[in-house]
């Protein structure tokens, strides 16, 4: 089992104030970019504050324009020495590389000789342990729902069925409004007859910029029934979102992204006896539609909101296939 690295502590405001003035200035300027998503900016801000703390502690608090590839390698080695995953190191490396690129392009008049400190000669960290991609089968999903029903966990059931049904990400599930329980079936524009699914309001999907890619999610009667059951149990409150945290006083607030992770880790995984994570529901939907039901991958691509079916193929895991059969 791979060792889990201790999470680097976030930079405090007192620590931040001690950073070189240019590093503070360029970080604030860099984070004003409108073409990056809010989630990306949040990740970059955290990663760069951690980087500048390393610069303060280990690199004499030099301004970024005086740093060299040697410092970049030192930082990468520092991260790897903490047993950070390769994806975690790459994210922090990408943040530093991005702000260096920003200086090269937009501050070149002031620093014409500056070059990105993460050049091609600094190798990427080797791939670390990765969990096996194993989607949930239809039978496993039924078992999970059955057990949660016994526990009266109706919000969790609504989340699983809606996320699986629509093939959405956790960040998209989080945006869903409880008003979708009042939706009618989508009507065929040619015949006027009801189709067998509903459409949500517009949600922000994964994409560049503050707005990102906006789309509506499709969901079936199975999800609708679970949503109505959850709202019946939930009762009246002022929160407009479907998935919420309720206090003992009955107040409700929009559920955080980390809450979905907690459900998967502390509830779903223990029921299933193996690792379950939010994105697995999306991958399971793609796999089950293509591998079990034989659906056209182009239609599955549209459900998941992918621009290319090549992306959708990455989600589909077909067990039992062996690439070397024809060699024997």
Image: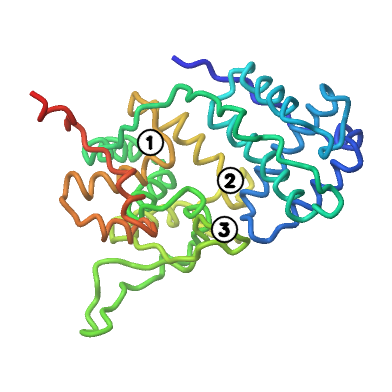
Q: Position of residue 201 (x, y in %)?
A: 46, 68
Residue at image location 90% in from the left, 37% down from the top: 20
- Callout 1 secondary element: loop
In front: label 2 or label 3: 3
Q: Position of residue 247 (x, y in %)?
A: 62, 45
How dense is the environment of label 3, judged by Cα within 10 Å: few (below 14), some, or many (20 and up)? some
| Horizontal arrangement in the rendering, residue 299 relative to residue 280 (left or right) | left
- Are the residues flagged by discs 1 and 3 in contact, CB closer than 8 Å? no
Q: Which mark is residue 170?
A: none
In front: label 2 or label 1: 2
Residue at image location 23% in from the left, 45% down from the top: 288
Q: Quadrant of the N terminus?
A: top left
Q: Position of residue 299 (x, y in %)?
A: 26, 60
| Horizontal arrangement in the rendering, residue 16 relative to residue 271 (left or right) | right
| Horizontal arrangement in the rendering, residue 20 relative to residue 274 (left or right) | right
- Callout 3 secondary element: loop
If you read the primary sequence from the N terminus, does the residue marked by circle 1 or circle 3 appear first?
A: 1
If you read the primary sequence from the N terminus, does the residue marked by circle 2 or circle 3 appear first?
A: 3
Give 315 or 271, whichever is nearer the viewer.
315
- Pointer 3 residue: 208
How dense is the environment of label 1, judged by Cα within 10 Å: few (below 14), some, or many (20 and up)? few
- Pointer 1 residue: 151
Give 326 or 53, whichever is nearer the viewer.
326
- Callout 2 secondary element: loop
Tell me how far mark 2 sits from mark 1, CA to CA: 22 Å
Q: Residue furthest left?
A: 328
Q: Quadrant of the C terminus?
A: top left
Tell me how far mark 2 sits from mark 3, CA to CA: 21 Å
In the image, residue 150 above or below residue 300: above
Residue at image location 67% in from the left, 40% down from the top: 97
Q: Which mark is residue 256?
A: 2
């Amino acid at each position: 089992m791979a060792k889990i690295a201790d999470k680097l502590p976030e930079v405090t405001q007192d620590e931040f104030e001690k950073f070189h003035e240019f590093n503070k200035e360029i970080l604030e300027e860099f984070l004003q970019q409108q073409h990056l998503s809010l989630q990306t900016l949040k990740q970059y801000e955290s990663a760069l504050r951690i980087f500048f703390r390393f610069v303060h502690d280990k690199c004499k608090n030099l301004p970024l324009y005086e740093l060299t590839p040697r410092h970049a390698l030192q930082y990468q080695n520092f991260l790897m020495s903490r047993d950070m995953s390769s994806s975690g190191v790459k994210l922090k490396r990408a943040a530093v590389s991005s702000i260096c690129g920003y200086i090269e392009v937009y501050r070149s008049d002031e620093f014409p000789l500056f070059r990105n400190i993460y050049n091609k000669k600094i190798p990427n960290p080797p791939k670390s342990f990765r969990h096996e991609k194993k989607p949930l089968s239809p039978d496993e999903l039924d078992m999970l729902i059955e057990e949660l029903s016994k526990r009266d966990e109706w919000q969790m059931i609504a989340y699983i069925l809606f996320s699986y049904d629509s093939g959405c990400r956790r960040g998209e599930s989080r945006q869903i409004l409880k008003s979708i329980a009042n939706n009618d079936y989508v009507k065929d524009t040619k015949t006027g007859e009801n189709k067998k699914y509903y459409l949500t309001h517009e949600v922000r999907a994964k994409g560049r910029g503050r707005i990102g890619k906006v789309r509506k999610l499709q969901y079936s009667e199975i999800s609708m029934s679970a949503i109505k059951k959850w709202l019946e149990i939930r009762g009246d409150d002022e929160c407009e979102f479907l998935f919420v945290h309720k206090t003992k006083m009955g107040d409700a607030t929009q559920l955080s992204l980390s809450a979905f992770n907690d459900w998967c880790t502390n509830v779903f995984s223990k029921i299933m006896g193996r690792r379950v994570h939010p994105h697995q529901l999306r991958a399971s939907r793609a796999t089950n539609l293509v591998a079990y039901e034989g659906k056209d991958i182009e239609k599955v691509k549209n459900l998941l909101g992918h621009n290319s079916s090549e992306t959708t193929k990455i989600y589909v895991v077909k067990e039992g296939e062996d690439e070397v059969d024809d060699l024997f």
